[in-house]
Image (tube, helix red, strand yellow):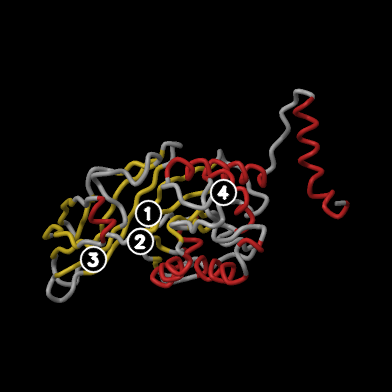
Amino acid sequence: MWSLAAYYVPYVSQVAQLRRGVDPPRNAFRVQQMLFERAGRFLATGSPPTRGYLDPTQEPEYGVLSNWGVGHLLRYRSERPMVQDNFGVYGGRRTYDQAWAYFAAIDENTAIEIAGRLRARYVVADPLGAGSLEPYPPDSLARRLAQHFGSERELPRGRGRVAALTQHRLVFHTSTSPLSSLIIPKRDPTVSVWEIVLGARVEGSASPGSEVVASLPLSTTEGRSHVYQASTRAGEDGAWSLTVPYATDTPPSPAVQTAKRYRVTAGQATAAFTVSDADVRSGATVVGPDL
């Protein structure tokens, strides 16, 4: 226990301050833990319950993938099974390796295949990905979830474009007021929860070779807003298709609202389309607009 004393001293000090009626200062690491607690409480009410939380003889229907360092916290706050956590004997080396491969994946299809093998339906994301202090590449899934929020982004200094995610949809996002993180310098602590879905394939037509851009505003109950944006290019025959993860008839969760329709543009042409939750969950093909 003496070897762990340095780790627990700040916590004991905070308890002592609370007992004296003093609100102790919160460092960025503790703030990040509080955000994970909120994410866990969301999962407890915003995701379907699973078998086996208190009965190890029952096999859960799905798992939750997260940073290994908060797996134990999330397990108790959400009452959901974690793919990996900070007590490694519960998951094993295979799940650790697969979790790292998932967050490091550049191609979303590769990440989806890994999540399928792990039977992960939800992902809790923060800048550490699977739990790495080393920065991930800008086009890795860890960065696309935690910093790009699933949307298409232009990388700085002309390093190209990161495509939008098509099978991950945001169901919860919590963050803090601007505080510099002690873990990721110059980045605000933030945690998001994602659901893995099949996504709806939207097909339409436009001028041959034109860039087609679809966007959908999102807002969260915690006061955050994002715009999901994805693009493609019409073929020589003018046909275009996009796979999108958000429905417009049903919110992805009680914590995230979407606009009533997607806005899609090609040059000066503008149109709109809608997608049902049934289409997103079944991977259906939807007839989109002609631009």
The residues bearing labels 3 and 2 have C-alpha atoms spaced at a distance of: 21 Å
Nearest to the eye among marks 2 and 4: give it: 4
Location of residue 219 (image quadrant): top left
**Outermost residue, front direction?**
57
Q: Quadrant of the C terminus?
A: bottom left
In the displayed structure image, the side of residue 234 where residue 220 appears, left or right? right
The residues bearing labels 3 and 4 have C-alpha atoms spaced at a distance of: 52 Å
Q: Which mark, by number, is residue 56? A: none
Mark toward the start of the polypeptide (2 vs 4): 4
Residue assigned mark 3? 211
Residue assigned mark 1? 169
Query: Of helix, strand and loop, which one carries label 1?
Result: strand
Residue 119, given in percent of the width and then of the height, sits at 45, 63
Residue 38, given in percent of the width and then of the height, sits at 54, 41
Query: Of helix, strand and loop, which one carries label 2?
Result: loop
Location of residue 15 (image quadrant): top right
Contact (Cβ within 8 Å) of mark 2 with mark 4:
no
Query: Of helix, strand and loop, which one carries label 4?
Result: loop
Residue assigned mark 2? 167
Mark toward the start of the polypeptide (4 vs 1): 4
Nearest to the eye among marks 4 and 1: give it: 4
Residue 86, given in percent of the width and then of the height, sits at 66, 57
Contact (Cβ within 8 Å) of mark 2 with mark 1:
no
- Residue at 78% x, 30% y is 17
Contact (Cβ within 8 Å) of mark 3 with mark 1:
no
Nearest to the eye among marks 3 and 4: give it: 4
The residues bearing labels 2 and 4 have C-alpha atoms spaced at a distance of: 31 Å
Residue 247, given in percent of the width and then of the height, sits at 27, 50
Contact (Cβ within 8 Å) of mark 4 with mark 1:
no
In the displayed structure image, the side of residue 180 where residue 249 appears, left or right? left
Residue assigned mark 4? 54
- Residue at 38% x, 39% y is 254
